Amino acid sequence: MINLIQYEENIKKNNLDNCYIFCGIDEELIKENIRTLVNKVVDKNFIDLNYVRFDGDNLNGFDDIINACETLPFMSEKKVVLVYRANFLGEGEDNYKKNLYNSLKEYIGNIPSSTVLIFYYIFKNKREKLSYKVQKLDNKCRVVKADKIFGRQLEAKVKEVFNIKEKEIGHIELKLFCSNLQSDMGIIENEVEKLCCYTMDRPIKKEDIYAMYPKKGEDDIFDLVDLIGDKKVKEAVDILNELIYKGDKIPEIMYMIERQFKLLYKIKNFLSKGKDKNFIVSQIKLPMFICEKLIGQSKKFTLSQIEKAINICLNSEEKMKKSSVDKKVEMELLIINTIAG
């Protein structure tokens, strides 16, 4: 089994397999990476003839897939056959799924060299692991675990793109830049190009990154929670009013504050048990840059203060749903009560 970084490296080097199984929680991420492979293999002028797709939930049997694989590509060296949402590869064992899986297992060693056969299935939740069925096929095809990359892996990937552009970026600036990025190679290359053009021949500074990528609402929430931790009522209320003025909806602001305190609660617990940053990143699934901020914030609160803040958020949320209170005033009271705690 390989991850997306290894998969992308293989695509770049033309190290292609003739059978892939993608799996993960994020269907859009999987589809995006399959498109990269299709664009590499299939001439866009003949894509309708050389790219065949089947809905894995509505297969009459495996014969249709075999027939598509065995048909020679038109005016091209290769064709792609995709079976999307191939849920027969996940857990569960009715006769329909069993027959499809057994047919795949039997055929997988006989796929023509002119065909790239691709399957993907989506995990039902973040805790789901690779099914035992796919594990059995791992030595017969290329299994790709499609997890978003973050932290040091993302930073290394982005640094490589800057190196190709022969553009230097410092460690701190790189971390800041990556905190604004999605784990998408096309987006990464585009954003690096924009930043390189913006800075021209001079070094990249933090101010350039702030100018190109204005603060997100999430960053404002970090600032707001920081000010609550520092017990600065006026400044915290000012940020709240700024968020409302910019058009952020009060229920969304409430959700972000509540989410922030819940993350702080988890991190405070991990730290009390002696867990390090890498462990925390693996558990809360956020970039290292964000985790470092959260760890710093958690030190401003005791566990009981965080618990109280979460309860205040829940009570305020309930009150705003069930009554006609002034929501802005209620949010200001939430901040005051949280700081008073």
Image: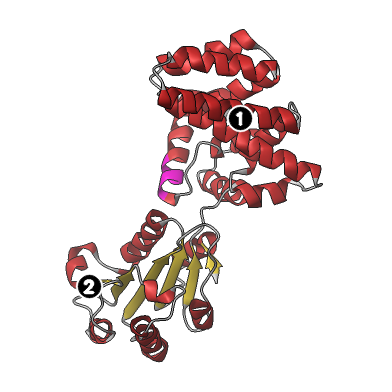
Return the x and y of residue 219 as percentages of the image width and height: 55, 27
Task: Give the colour scheme of this rendering.
Answer: secondary structure
Residue type at the position of mark 1: Asn
Question: Would residue 116 be seen by someone viewing this image from the given angle?
Answer: yes
Q: Residue at x 19, y 75 (%)?
A: 75
Query: Pointer 2: residues within 10 angstroms few (<14), some, or many (20+)?
Result: many
Residue linked to disc 1: 311
Q: Is residue 216 visible?
A: no
Q: Quadrant of residue 207?
A: top right
- Quadrant location of the C terminus? top right
Calculate the distance from the C-alpha at mark 2 to the C-alpha at mark 1. Answer: 57 Å
Check disc 2 and report its element: helix, strand or loop. helix
Q: Which residues are magenta?
A: 186-190
Secondary structure of the residue carrying tag 1 is helix
| Residue 314 falls left or right of residue 19 | right
Q: Nearer the viewer, residue 59 or 2?
A: 59
Instruction: Report which residue position mark 2 lands on.
Output: 50
Picture coordinates of residue 57, whole percent (x, y):
29, 71
Q: Amino acid at mark 2?
A: Asn
